[in-house]
Amino acid sequence: MSDNIGPRNGLKSLVGEYRQAGLSRREFVKRAAVLGLSAPAAASLLAAATPRLAMAQETPQQGGRFTEGYDRDFTKMDPVNSGWADPGYNAIYEYVMLRDANGAIVPCLAESWTISDDNLSWTFKIRDGLKFHSGAACTNANVVEDFNLFRSAEGGGQNAIFWNAVTDVTAGDGNTVVVKLSKPFAAFPETLATEYSMIHNQAARAEAGDQYGATTEDGTGPFTLGEFTPGNQVLFKKWADYPGSIVPFLENKGPAYIDELRFVPILEVANRANELEAGGVDAIKNPAPQDLDRLTSNPDVVVMEWANPANLFINLNDQKTELGFDDIRVRQAISHAIDRQGLADAIYFGHAIATYGPIPSNWKWYEPGVEQFNQFDLEKAKSLLEEAGWTVGSDGIREKNGVKLSFTLYNWGAQTYGAQINEAITGMLKDAGVEMKLVTLDTAELFPRVLDPKAEPVDAFSYEWLWSSQMDVLVIFNSIPNFPFNGDHQDLKQAFDDWQGAATDAELEAAARKAQLIWAEKLPLIPVVTGNVIWAHHKKVHGWTPTQTMLYPLYNDVWVEQ
Amino acid sequence: MSAGGTYELTVGVETEVVPDGAPGRTLGDKLAPLVANKLALLGGLLTIAFLVLGLVGLLIVSRQEWQHLYLDQNVRRTLILPFEEGTFLGTDNLGRSMVWRLVAGTGISLGAGLAVTAISMSVGMALGSLAGYVGGLTDRLISALIDLTWGFPVILVAVIFVGMLEPGLTAVILAISVVNWAGYARIVRAQTLSLKGRAFVEAARALGVSRWKIVLRHLIPNMLGTTLVMASYYIAVTVIAEAGLSFIGLGAQPPTPSLGQMVSNGRSFLSKDPWIVILPGGTIALLVLALNTLGDGLRDIFDPRLRRW
Amino acid sequence: MLTFIVHRTLYAIGLLFVASVVIFYGLRVAPGEVTDVLTNPVNRIFMIENLREKLGLDKPLPLQYFIFMGNFLRGDPGYSLVNGEPINELLRSAAGYTLKLGALSALLTYGTAIPLGVIAAWKRNSFFDYGANLLAVLGMGIPNFLLAILLIQEFAVKRHWFPVAGYESWKHILLPAVVLSAEAIAINLRVVRSSVLEELNRDYVRTLYAKGLPEGKIIWVHVLRNALPPIIALAGVMLRTLLGYTLIVETIFRWPGLGYQLVNSVLKRDYTVAQTLAILLTVAVILFNLLADIGQQWADPRVRQGAKTG
């Protein structure tokens, strides 16, 4: 069933890469850790793999340029005022705290933090002596200012909704930040570890206005913004005054190794593998899955892959009662008619995970119990529909009370494989007597149509979210006001409240598992499939180690053999 | 732009067609040069073959009981090579029959081409002959409209139409028509101007035949040649333009296939499973070849001056 | 001639005004909003009104039009609503690349289409003619994104003669230029051929032959010159087609020109960028048509003679 779970796949390809591409021993161990393997286990695996292989050069070389081919166009690098976040954020900004390869929270700008006994007050100790690129000092006052902006919807904080529990943020003694809460908030670090909570200088932001993040930036990261041409490139320059990072999994404790970090968007999927192999770029994200065999057999190329922190959903509007979408049996029937593994195999050539619950199986608190639901079972789909009163009409489409089970699904054009997946699903649903029509719309058109309370309600839409804090995105999706796709599931809401008010990791985990199970059964939104994120680089590149727990890699350790 | 009427020309077709006024010529006489020109004949036969194929395609697309031919998928039998495992032209990446998808796609693409041609030609014919025949302010307004339309890229118009309707063939057909009518209108206007001064029109006018009768009886029939040539060209252009719009996701919406959409969706398979893209791509090229050679042949028939050479 | 030029120029300015209104309203009438590109769907509801107000999208449309046109005519169309990039910056970096690619494509187009078209007409129904025709059909009949990927596969991935994509050296421009000119070559070749054929039938050609002028000179000097007006007239149309489809070439070859920016901004409803680029594009086409008009007047021997005698 879950043969394509990331770690297992990743390990297989890791050993393969090690054999072919001469990964260094240290990198092998590091990557194995990314896949959740302990160092001794990695070492024994390494010994078994190819003991005689010459070790690659391990001393970092300074200088040069590293070019990464990115799979979408760039937006401005403003953590507050932009629609999505790009890998360039990791070049110029830093997190207060972030996740390591295993999902554990590690320090970055905050060197330590303490939580009060009642769990209602967090105190972050900010590193001393930090500076922004402009030369201005970066202290607890800046972090307070940023936090207050992040939590204010009126002020423009995109993710203010994640900060609901926060009642007050103040500067404490000794370069600390004190955050007061209305309820325990163990999930706080999940929010702080997203790109939308990266620290930047509000004075610079106020000065640049809407052009902040495009023409200018003021962060604390190892690079500064050189040139930004949307659709063409983003160029970053090494910041010589970078004080070094305290992130434990980084090896480089000083300024970056490379002089220039450059991103180019490679929007044509077919060309990503071509560009890496022809040497136009040093690394790529998300080559076409059908090109992976070719890439992995190329001795100069190293490939890494695992399930994205993402999931593609089909959202049936449960206000469409005439279509029966408020009837759990109809939603379950539609779900059972979807051959998820078939989709993963046909469209992703196996480089994807069928999702039976809302979160893909490589998450630390994944609940395998969800797999008892939503398995491909056409007979069960048909009998559920019969049971709900939908009988097959003369044209093969089911009907009830004179209404055909026929609807239009709006597919979000920004998801690379969404159109193909939904196209295949139209074929699968047809076998169960359900007619689905497909219309693909771009962001600017889809969301006003789906989310605007004044718009004519749509039957269904398909949306893939990409968010490193996966439980939070579920919570948020289910708290959008006027959102006609959620249904009214009190037990699910309770589980989300438990998550948001959890005081400990154990409570978080319990709430997450409960929510996944309820979701898988009641299907407020129907989970379908999670594509693997595929990272590939030329073997002359070192220290470029994306992880499963963050969206993009850090660039402190990257260096390129000259 | 409208001053030098002689060279009102667009994309590859002469405008100054001498009216085939000579009476008593039979259809056989008219077709003789087409038969004589083997290439044009080949083009004509190929076009007929494509039209038949396209009709079959439109038929199976329009009848629900036959849609399964090109829609039935099997995600566990994908990308089968042509002639293997009991298939004729293999299966696509969702395991659907390539041959039926090609037939349906040809129907959709040709159908869109014919629709665009019909719309842009009726509008172009109406406005062009009106401008040319009535002249004066009417002419100036219509000419300005033509020149204005001339300035807009198809893609911009397509996005606006897609926004107002919904992505799909209707929007594509309207968008391409809205841009294309102007080209034909310019030609019709120029021809009307030149025909207006000719003896047989002058004679009709002297006899008191009404304006509209003159336009309908004398002018439009005399433009049949150009019209056919342009039609063959417009169909080809539409097929290609639809492919371009499919590239940015504004073409026919899946699972309904068009040739352009099949090429666009298949393009990432070129290095591994090339037939997915080569088959529809080759079909488009062959279709355009057929239409162009036919168009050339027709032009030779309707332009006696060229025949002399 | 001077009155003609003045008249046509005034006419072109009038057209441009109407075009700017059509573009502005067309983009606003189409549903969809830039604000949705700027927010997460989850936070849309909280942000959207603020954003509209901040971007001035809540003002009445005619007012927005005049504000925009005022800025545009002052030479400062503002910045992208989506990514904050100043539009003048964007134009500075992208226009040069578009011009380079366009110029090379034009060179390729006319450098190929004119000689091939003339020879095809001259040696009508020869194998050369058939070959040229076949080339024209292939150029027109293969969707350009397919041609692009085929060329990349063959000449960049397999043979390493050219880079796959990018814009760093002169080698990068060749494949995109070939793809961009393929359709133009095809169309122009056919126009040149039929225009030359038409000229060959004219009386003056017979006279020149009778005078005993060398055939080469008759064809390449006299006939070609007289066959040029339709080709010039077509150039305006070609410009429009080219600019519309550079997007595809630019996306595949990562050529940082204006076509991608235009289409992307229209799709994202990045109004300031889309309006600026669409209006500039229309200006280019109308200006080009104006010049082609004047050029045609000049090239047409009948008109020239009329000017001389009258």
Image (tube, coloured by chain):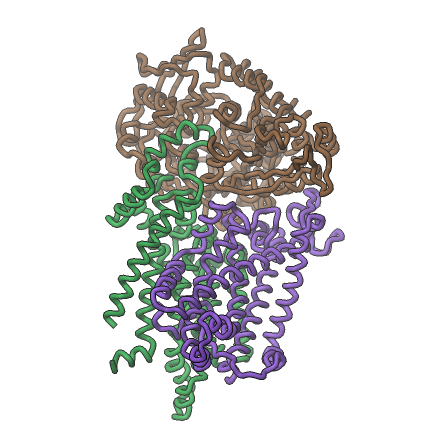
Residue placed furthest toward the front: B208
Residue B295: quadrant of the picture: bottom right
Residue A460: percent from left, percent from top? 57, 35
Q: Residue shown at 49%/47% (left/top)? A: B162
Residue C234: percent from left, percent from top? 41, 67
Residue B257: percent from left, percent from top? 61, 51
Residue C119: percent from left, percent from top? 47, 78
Exactly how many numbered labels are in the figure? Answer: 0
Q: Does residue A562 appear in this view?
A: no
Vertical placement of residue C47 versus A52, above or below: above
Colour of the chain lettered C: green
Q: Residue shown at 55%/43% (left/top)? A: A439
In this view, the residue in front, A330 or A58, is A330
Residue placed furthest toward the top: A117
Q: Does residue C14 appear in this view?
A: yes
In this view, the residue in front, C43 or A181, is C43
Vertical placement of residue B98 versus B36, above or below: above
Quarter of the image that includes the N terminus of chain B:
bottom left
Vertical placement of residue A536 versus C235, above or below: above
Judge from the rendering whether residue A545 lies leftward or rightward of residue B83; answer left or right.
Answer: left
In this view, the residue in front, A181 or A394, is A394
> Which chain is represented by purple in the image?
B
Colour of the chain lettered A: brown
